[in-house]
Amino acid sequence: MAATKSKAVYNVYRALTHGLSPLLYLHLHWRKLRGLEHPLRWRERLGRPSLPRPEGPLIWFHAVSLGEGMAAIPVIKQCIERRPDLTILMTTTTSSAFGVIEKRLPTGVLHQFAPVDTPSAVDSFLGYWKPNAIVLLESELWPNLIMSASEKGIMLALLNARVSTKSFKRWSGPALLPLISLMLSKFSLISPLSNMQAIHFQLLHAPPFVINFSGDLKYVVGEFDISEGEIKSMEDLKVHCAHRKVWMASSIHKGEEEVILGIHKVLRQEYPDLLTIIVPRHPHHGKEIAQKLWKEGHGVGLRSQRDKLLGDTSIYVVDTLGELKHLYKLSPVAVIGGSFFPSLSGHNISEAAAAGCATLTGPYIGHFSIMVLEMQRLNPLSVLQVGGKLELEEALRKLFGDVKVLEAHCAAAKQVYHTLSSGVVQNVWNLLDIQILQRALS
């Protein structure tokens, strides 16, 4: 009875997505005109390839955006090292992730934009690429993709698997649970983000024997080559930051800049040489912030224009993507944004910790609360979670006011990061190899 209901719900979804296919085509075209889809490669979203498929076995990795894509790259590197006979195909959804991830992918890895979840796009994509296995990141559960792959005998894995609290409530309801449980039954491996996430997947009727915890891939910060020009640019910035009080606010969402700039104004009265580096989540937001500050007469540098850090530059706005890892090395203090308003749910703090920054975040951090609790359990100084603007201001004042306190927080963050990131990629690879690759390629 349950299986019949699940299949019925899926058939409704499949019929709806089939019927909406013409509208989705128009929607993608509209997004292309707005610059939200790649101007030349947007048709890949319809399952139309732009690259030839090499002969031999192929593994498809899919991540929706930049954060998930960067988390997948260390596993892809391990896969290439252990199984050089495999072709790796990497797909992403967002155009913003494309520019950064394509540069970071190992040589020989193919990149395409992922197909939208319509029967025609998915069938076209799978029919052309014929993957032996599909590895999805985090919460990329698309019914047509999963069901079509299963019908074709393609093995499925879900790494860093997570379900937000909001999604869990919705998916647990009588309308969607039959479809969710049907999709989860098609996976041969689900590697959850945490033990709590493992419980969520079990409550959503995922088969218990496919759930295996291996660690959080977002703790793994990969090493990437950068150009000589980028190296020189970072070194120049480092020289100009060397004798100043510096702090960075990264992954800032709209409205959060007011919190950061308000604190900057107060602290600059105490520290006239203060430099505040602001890295918005979306680059266009950075240009808006800089233009507003210029009009108000502030000394502002804009990263995309390669502005120099002059003596009167007190705010440096980074409106580029893919540089956070290197920028964190410029600042002893990092405040992770996306965490100061109730509508937000935090961002990854591991890159800041890996760089040895004194790491702070706001009160609204969603599933990243697991990461914060794990780090604080090992060392309470490794990450500070503040309740809002006043607590952040006070925490920064303490860090800037005592070099030993600052050094203790920096050292704790780096040491805890190394503890938690150790062995994660190897654990993921072992599960992927045993439960997916050996069976898919036998």
Image (cartoon, helix red, strand yellow):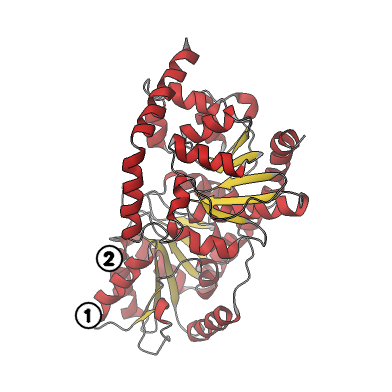
Residue 203 shows in this picture = no
Can you name the residue that lies furthest to the bottom here? Answer: 311
- Left or right: 302, with 408 as reference point: left
Q: Quadrant of the C terminus?
A: top right
Q: Amino acid at mark 2?
A: Glu
Label 1, secondary structure: give it.
helix
Task: Examine the rendered structure and indicate whether residue 396 appears above or below residue 239.
Answer: above
Residue 431 shows in this picture = yes
In this rendered view, identify the residue nearer to me: 199 or 285: 285
Marker count (numbered): 2
Q: Position of residue 16 (x, y in %)?
A: 35, 30
Can you name the residue that lies furthest to the left here? Answer: 296
Residue occupying image coordinates x 38% and y 33%: 17
Q: Position of residue 402 (x, y in %)?
A: 48, 73
Residue receiving disc 1 = 295
Residue occupying image coordinates x 42% and y 45%: 366
Residue occupying image coordinates x 39% and y 59%: 337
Task: Examine the rendered structure and indicate whether residue 297 appears above or below residue 189.
Answer: below
In this rendered view, identify the residue nearer to me: 117 or 259: 117
Residue 226: give its label.
none
Q: Amino acid at mark 1?
A: Lys
In this rendered view, identify the residue nearer to me: 419 or 238: 238
- Work out whether mark 2 precedes mark 1 in sequence or the reverse, and give the earlier one: 2
- Left or right: 167, with 237 as reference point: left
Q: Position of residue 276 (x, y in %)?
A: 39, 75
**Crowd rating for badge 2 (residues with CA inside 10 Å; few <14, some 14–19, many 20+):** few
In this rendered view, identify the residue nearer to me: 71 or 415: 71
Q: Position of residue 365 (x, y in %)?
A: 41, 49
Residue receiving disc 2 = 258
Question: To which quarter of the image does residue 188 belong?
Answer: top right
